[in-house]
Amino acid sequence: MGYSRFDPATHGRAPWNIGKTVGTKRPLTQKQIWAIRFFLDREGRLRDRALFDLAIDGKLRGCDLVKIKIGDLVAGPEIRTRAIVVQQKTGRPVQFEPYK
């Protein structure tokens, strides 16, 4: 449901998406991925680098990443060789092998 063309409050208001690209975003290129990895390494952001690698390698979305718990990746003092995360949007399990 839109606004009435007779409503004076809507005159002169620019659409929220004017000049913005709408629709599906393009995936990151290899060059962009390596640039992000290099930046995170240079800044010493180990946790962010691990989450970024996990997202890229596991094809996970941000909402799936924030739900991951330490117990999903670690069993006692050992890092698990495989972990499974259920995607929120599709409901499909994604299996990946964390880095050691």
Image (spheres, rainbow, N blue to C red):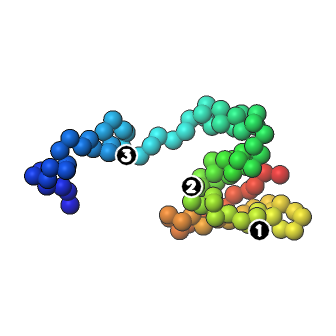
Q: Among all residues in the image, which is located at the extreme front?
A: 8
Q: Which residue is mark 3?
A: 23
Q: How crowded is the residue under tag 3: few (<14 C-alpha within 10 Å), some, or many (20+)?
A: few
Whole-number angstrom distance, CA of label 2 to CA of label 1: 19 Å
Q: Which residue is mark 2?
A: 61
Lower position in the chain sequence, tag 3 or tag 1: 3
Residue sitting at 63 percent across and 51 percent down? 55
Mark 2 is on which residue type? Arg
Percent across and percent down for residue 48 are 70, 47
Residue 57 visible (yes or no): no
Residue 63, above or below 11: below
Percent across and percent down for residue 61 are 56, 55
Quadrant of res 73:
bottom right
Residue 82 badge: none
Residue sitting at 66 percent across and 47 percent down? 52
Q: How crowded is the residue under tag 2: few (<14 C-alpha within 10 Å), some, or many (20+)?
A: some
Residue 39, above or below 84: above
**Which element type, helix, strand or loop, lies under badge 3?**
loop
Residue sitting at 55 percent across and 39 percent down? 28
Residue 71 badge: 1
**Which element type, helix, strand or loop, lies under badge 2?**
loop
Lower position in the chain sequence, tag 3 or tag 2: 3
Residue 69 visible (yes or no): yes
Mark 3 is on which residue type? Gly
Lower position in the chain sequence, tag 2 or tag 1: 2
Mark 1 is on which residue type? Gly
Q: Do residues under tags 3 and 2 come within 8 Å of each other at their CB atoms? A: no
Query: Which quadrant is home to the N terminus?
Result: bottom left
Q: How crowded is the residue under tag 1: few (<14 C-alpha within 10 Å), some, or many (20+)?
A: few
- Name the residue nearer the viewer: 21 or 19: 19
Q: Do residues under tags 3 and 1 come within 8 Å of each other at their CB atoms? A: no
**Which element type, helix, strand or loop, lies under badge 1?**
helix
